[in-house]
């Protein structure tokens, strides 16, 4: 059974411009599903709609979505907050610039405790430090005392991922989380997402315009063009047997012969 199931999703502006049409996809437990496509194809709107985070003036107009068997989206109505969290492209902007990392994490953990109605033992600051360790931050005590602008983009992205998994979501939605990071840091963050999937069994919906990143991380891929899914298939099919002319165009423009070889010889991590 799918963890996330989206059927016939439609998104439009309040003035009637259609942004996404009849989009269907699903994500299994422990699976990373990519959404790829050129700028403006509707990837971000799709991701935001699933968390009830569409910008002012943009709304879901059709379709339904279920997470772990519970319907949370029914046409324009968000029935419940899905057990999903989001990782954004620009972590430094997504964090509060005026608060130290420790204060932000403590506030989040207290909020989550209240939400769960659970009184957890242990010092909340220690739990915050443990959370940072779990995302590969070697000196959590020092990082807790810093402001976001005092950390690198990659470090802030680790903090964002720590915050995203603190809520123990069933689904992580990541929108270009490695765009703008240098290649080495990008590889580390992708490794962290992979490790998170392995450890917590979450499903991931991973938005990217980068076919290379998609090849490294995803098991299945939805290719979007102009608000529609043109092809939804296993990553090997997308790279080796693309069924849609637009997918072939996207691959050609990515100039990623080496990546296709990686997929073929199995050196690509899954
Ligand atoms: N706040 C908004 N109000 C109205 N239309 C919007 C808004 N934000 C984006 N759009 C439009 O929605 C369409 C889909 O945009 P979206 O951001 O989902 O594309 P994308 O595939 O994620 O592109 P990118 O890779 O550049 O982020 C585009 O035509 C865009 O202009």
Image: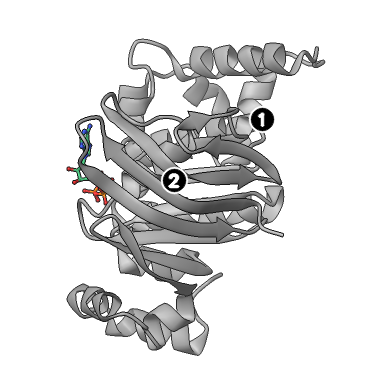
The residue where tag 2 is placed is 174
Residue 190 appears in the figure: yes
Of helix, strand and loop, which one carries label 2?
Answer: strand
Give me the disc on residue 130: 1
Task: Label 1, secondary structure: give it.
Answer: helix
Q: Which of marks 2 and 1 is nearer the N terminus?
A: 1
Question: 23 and 102: which one is in front?
Answer: 23
Does the image show residue 188?
A: no
In the foreground, 77 or 180: 77
User: Where does residue 159 sit, x and y in percent of width and height?
Assistant: 48, 32
Q: Which of 249 and 201 is in front in this view?
A: 249
Give the x, y percent position of residue 182: 28, 52
Give percent across and percent down for residue 9: 43, 49
Could you tell me which residue is drawn at 47 percent across and 33 percent down?
160
Q: Does the residue labelled 1 lie within 8 Å of ligand 1?
A: no
Q: Residue 24 carries which label?
A: none
In the rendered structure, the answer to whether residue 255 lies left or right of residue 151 reads: left
175 to the left or right of 173: left
Q: Would you say the residues marked 2 and 1 are in contact, meaning their CB atoms lie under 8 Å apart?
A: no
Q: Nearer the viewer, mark 2 or mark 1?
A: 2
Number of other residues with Cα within 10 Å of mark 2, as a class: few under 14, some 14 to 19, many 20 or more: many
Quarter of the rendered structure image containing ligand 1: top left
Q: Position of residue 204 (x, y in %)?
A: 54, 52
Picture quarter with the C terminus: bottom right
Corner quadrant of residue 154? top left
**Residue at image x 42%, y 43%?**
62
């Amino acid at each position: 059974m799918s963890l996330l199931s989206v059927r016939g999703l439609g998104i439009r502006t309040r003035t009637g411009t259609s942004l996404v049409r009849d989009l269907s996809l699903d994500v299994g437990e422990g699976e990373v599903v990519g959404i790829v496509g050129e700028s403006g194809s509707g990837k971000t709107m799709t991701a935001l709609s699933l968390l009830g985070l569409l910008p002012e003036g943009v709304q879901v107009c059709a379709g339904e979505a279920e997470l772990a068997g519970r319907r949370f989206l029914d046409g324009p109505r968000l029935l419940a907050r899905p057990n999903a969290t989001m990782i954004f492209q620009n972590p430094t902007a997504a964090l509060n610039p005026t608060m130290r990392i420790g204060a932000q994490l403590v506030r989040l953990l207290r909020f989550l405790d209240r939400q769960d109605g659970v009184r957890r033992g242990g010092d909340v600051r220690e739990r915050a430090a443990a959370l940072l360790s779990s995302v590969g931050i070697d000196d959590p005590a020092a990082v807790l005392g810093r402001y976001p602008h005092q950390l690198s983009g990659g470090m802030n992205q680790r903090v964002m991922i720590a915050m995203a998994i603190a809520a123990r979501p069933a689904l992580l939605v990541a929108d270009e989380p490695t765009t703008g990071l240098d290649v080495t840091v990008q590889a580390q963050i992708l490794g962290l997402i992979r490790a998170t999937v392995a450890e917590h069994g979450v499903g991931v919906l991973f938005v990217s315009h980068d076919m290379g990143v998609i090849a490294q991380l995803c098991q299945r891929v939805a290719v979007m063009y102009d608000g529609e899914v043109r092809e939804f298939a296993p990553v090997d099919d997308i790279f080796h047997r693309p069924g849609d002319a637009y997918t072939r165009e996207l691959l050609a423009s990515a100039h990623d012969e080496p990546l296709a070889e990686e997929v073929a010889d199995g050196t690509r991590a899954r």
